[in-house]
Amino acid sequence: MALTPDLSQHAIFITGAGRGLGRSMALKLARCGAAIGVVDIDAAACAAVAVEITAAGGRATALPADVSSRAALMAAAAQFAAQHGRIDAVINNAMLLRYEPLEAITEEVLDRMTGVGINGSVWGAQALLAHYDPKRGATLINMASPVAGRGFPNTAAYSLVKGAIVTFTKVLAAELGPKGIRVNALSPGSVPTPGALGLNDPAEYERRSRTIPMRRLGHEDDNAEACAFLLSPEASFINGEILNVDGGISAAG
Ligand SMILES: NC(=O)c1ccc[n+]([C@@H]2O[C@H](COP(=O)([O-])OP(=O)(O)OC[C@H]3O[C@@H](n4cnc5c(N)ncnc54)[C@H](O)[C@@H]3O)[C@@H](O)[C@H]2O)c1
């Protein structure tokens, strides 16, 4: 049975919510009653997800923005906060999924990947700090990955971003905990989203599904359910956790 915490008093700002894991978290949290700020660089995808949520009876605002720009992210957050009086949670999900060998990483690619994945997550955290209600507290969720914990060849740029996200999550858990803000990360594994399908061909996914301890790939819903749990009152003492939602990939090494 799906977990459905009552999030009707929550305004939740989700980056990269136009498709993939961001979209599935947006739909799930909207079903739990939250008002969703759907942030994505792809304005059409952003609008489509907001329409999908409202058509199903939920509440959503399309907020097209490039998260690597502090000004753009802060403007989107200010618009969302003005609508709801505060922001209760930010999910730093936007990222470019891209693998290549070390020698192929260009300055432009590295700047873009760190700009979206690292800088964007810093701006997301700052937006939450600027707009949360200290009397209510708040939750920040970052998106890590199993690649942060081991060496997967040809993923240097992507993995260094995810490694940074793990450290960033722990630092902010310690720094923002006393302010009433819990900071955790989800670490999903092998979910064939639109972005991930560009990295791995179907044969690779078939091979991988046979090596994952649970003997299947991840579903977008696996991650969305874990996200709902982290936002629920039952998770009120969970802070600084990197929650693996990967069927045991990380445990098996
Ligand atoms: N799919 C997996 O197996 C997997 C595994 C581990 C971690 N993750 C992480 O989950 C998150 C979501 O991944 P996904 O698989 O859904 O990817 P995806 O590529 O399908 O979706 C990413 C979304 O982010 C948006 N985006 C990209 N750059 C942006 C920017 N500058 N500003 C705003 N939005 C931007 C894209 O337009 C897209 O809608 C990422 O952080 C990824 O690293 C995914």
Image: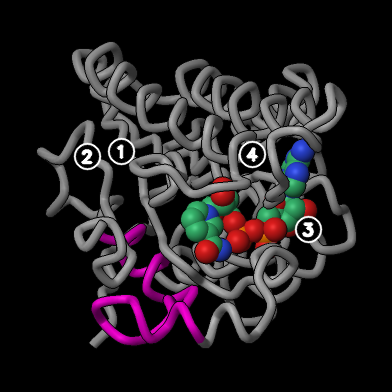
Dot in front, 2 or 3: 2
The quadrant where residue 19 appears: bottom right
Tell me the tag on residue 83. Answer: 4
Where is residue 9? Give x, y as percent.
38, 50
Residue range highlighted in magenta: 207-229
Q: Please name the residue that numbered disc 3 is placed on.
A: 46
Q: Which residue is mark 2?
A: 241
Label 1: which residue? 184
Q: Mark 4 to mark 1: distance in Å?
A: 26 Å
Q: Answer few, some or many: residues within 10 Å of disc 3's Cα (few below 14, many 20 plus, some between 14 and 19).
A: many
User: Looking at numbered disc 4 in the image, what kind of residue is underneath it?
Assistant: Gln
Q: What amino acid type should be assigned to the residue bearing mark 1? A: Asn
Image coordinates of residue 141 in percent, x first then y, are 40, 41
For mark 4, give the secondary structure. helix
Is residue 185 shown in magenta?
A: no
Tell me the element at label 3.
helix
- The coloring applied to the image is one colour
